[in-house]
Image (cartoon, grey):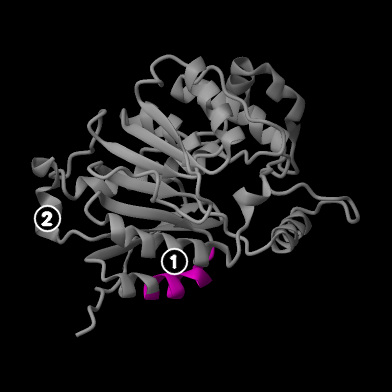
Amino acid sequence: MKNKLPQAVRVIPVERLHLRNVHRGRYDFKHQVAVNPELAAYIFRNAHGDDAIDFANPAAVRALNRALLNSEYAISDWDIPPQYLCPPVPGRADYLHYLADLLTESQNSIIPRGLSIRVLDIGSGANCIYPLIGHRAYGWRFVGSDIDPVALTNAQSIINANNGLNQAIELRLQTSPQAIFKGIVRAAELFDLTLCNPPFHASLAEANAGTQRKWKNLGKEAGKKPLLNFGGQARELWCRGGEEAFVCSMIAESVQFKGNCLWFTSLISKSASLPGIYRALNKAAVQDYRTIEMSQGQKKSRFVAWTFFDERQRSTWNQNR
């Protein structure tokens, strides 16, 4: 008889970031400029008379990220090569906080902290943002993987330049572009979580079209060539079949590593991707899955988490390690 999944659990989103997210309030640009003076060049007064930056400008986001990472996470030396993905820090931190909540279920409602928690970041990129925030916020240990050696070289330079990160973050090159866990997860290796920000467009043309729509919504000048949202190399932004195909491949491959990880997870940008992902989860015969909704003002996002352990096995996960 075909295994049926339980109904997906959805967390009703609030209109703000996670309660533990230090970025819930307005940006204190005066403080951030004091931390990173280069940010001052990108600040302007918006229509409401408030200080703001242009979040469609990767250089502005990069300058803000440097300030936020320094002031909130003690990352004093951070940069990325031109044209690489420059993600906004608050939203990335939110994913990690909700992942911590997920782990509390098998930790007697205690937020898990420390190096005993191991996390695999699929596609760490040049920015290495999840391991940096995750270690500083929770003390977790990370393995970051990527298919791009240039990205990993830059990520390693960030790790080397900041105290205490070399013992907490390890980077591994994925030499097979079609593989996700194969060649990265070792035979007896255990992870509490995997996380991923997959390339969500199906083609470069689709990525450009999405950027055009965002620029139009922001009232940008007609005819001016838009920058890709938050920058990004082609392999960071799109893959054949888009995020749905990527995550479905991840689910299929996770079956081979079902004993190595407590919770597999991935961000999902488009709600339209969910039905196909749910079908893949059903086919993989996972024990449970969750759809966790997140929100930052008008921007809605979510991640899907799945596990091959039943509730009893999850409760004894730490004891068996």
Does dot 2 land on a helix, a strand or a loop? helix
Q: Nearer the viewer, residue 205 or 135?
A: 205
For residue 208, which quarter of the picture?
Answer: bottom right
Q: Quadrant of the C terminus?
A: top left
- Is residue 60 in the magenta section? no
Residue for point 49% across, 17% down: 160
Query: Which x, y percent locates residue 39?
Result: 69, 24
Query: Which x, y percent locates residue 70?
Result: 52, 21
Q: Is residue 38 above or below residue 256?
A: above
Q: Is residue 181 above or below residue 171?
A: below
The extreme right residue here reads 223
Q: Is residue 17 above or below residue 264?
A: above
Mark 1 Cα-neighbour bin, 10 Å: few <14, some 14–19, many ≥20: some
Q: Is residue 248 above or below residue 199?
A: below
| Residue 193 visible here | yes
Q: Which residues are magenta?
A: 270-279
The three-letter code of the residue at mark 1 reads Cys
Q: Nearer the viewer, residue 305 or 29?
A: 305
Residue for point 51% across, 42% down: 146
- Asked whether, in this view, residue 293 is left or right of residue 115, the answer is right
Q: Nearer the viewer, residue 200 or 21?
A: 200
Q: CA distance from mark 1 to mark 2?
A: 25 Å
The three-letter code of the residue at mark 2 reads Gln
Residue for point 46% across, 19% down: 74
Query: Which x, y percent locates residue 115?
Result: 26, 28
Query: Which x, y percent locates residue 272?
Result: 52, 72
Q: Quadrant of the N terminus?
A: bottom left
Marking on residue 248: 1
Q: Nearer the viewer, mark 1 or mark 2?
A: 1
Residue for point 67% across, 45% down: 233
For residue 104, which quarter of the picture?
Answer: top left
Identify the residue under disc 2. Answer: 313
